[in-house]
Image (spheres, rainbow, N blue to C red):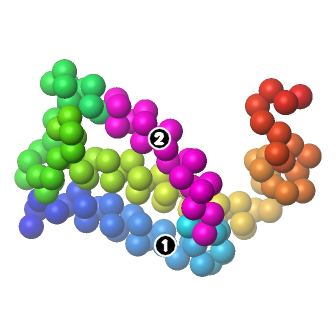
Amino acid sequence: MRHFSYVAVLAACLVGTASLEFWPRTRVYARWRRLARTLVPVLAVFVGWDLYAISRGHWTFDPRGVTGARLPGGIPLEEVLFFVAIPICAVLTLEAVRARRRHWLVGDEPSSPDAGRGPGAE
């Protein structure tokens, strides 16, 4: 069963933060397009980085801790799931804090003077 330890940790992270979708109503999963725009760059950069490190022999994974399912390039499935699960947990946590700290503005609030303005729009 040890080969499911990586997956178990990721599942525990997701389960531990799942309630934040409903209380305090972060709506992270409900805004799936926004979440996808957050995840795609993370996946591109870090999966690419891992693939490079694996191909050069700089990065390995303990076969006792992973299921053995590998994607092209030799990257374990769990590693790609890590780059999905952990950012989701981070976004859920960030949005939960923002919901409790209404004065903490980051610029994407509908009432914010900077809402809808991209970088360099000044």
Farthest residue toward the top?
56
10 Å crowding of disc 2: few (<14), some (14-19), many (20+): some
As drawn, 9 above or below 70: below
Circle 2 sits in a helix, a strand or a loop, which is it? helix
> Magenta segment: does it hold 48?
yes
Front residue of 99/113: it is: 113
Residue 2 is situated, as x and y percent measured from the top left of the image, at: 10, 62
- Upstream in the sequence, badge 2 or badge 1? 1
Q: Main secondary structure of the magenta part?
A: helix
Q: Is residue 57 left or right of residue 15?
A: left
- Where is residue 92, by image quadrant? bottom right
Q: What's the residue at 19%, 61% (across, down)?
A: 5
Which residue does the numbered mark 1 point to in the structure image? 18
Front residue of 103/35: it is: 35
The magenta stretch is: 30-49
**Is residue 118 among the parts visible in the rendering?**
yes
Circle 1 sits in a helix, a strand or a loop, which is it? helix
Instruction: Indicate the amino acid at tag 1.
Output: Ala
Disc number placed over residue 42 in the picture, else none: 2
> Magenta segment: does it hold 108?
no
Residue 17 is situated, as x and y percent measured from the top left of the image, at: 48, 68
Q: Is residue 58 left or right of residue 43?
A: left
10 Å crowding of disc 1: few (<14), some (14-19), many (20+): some
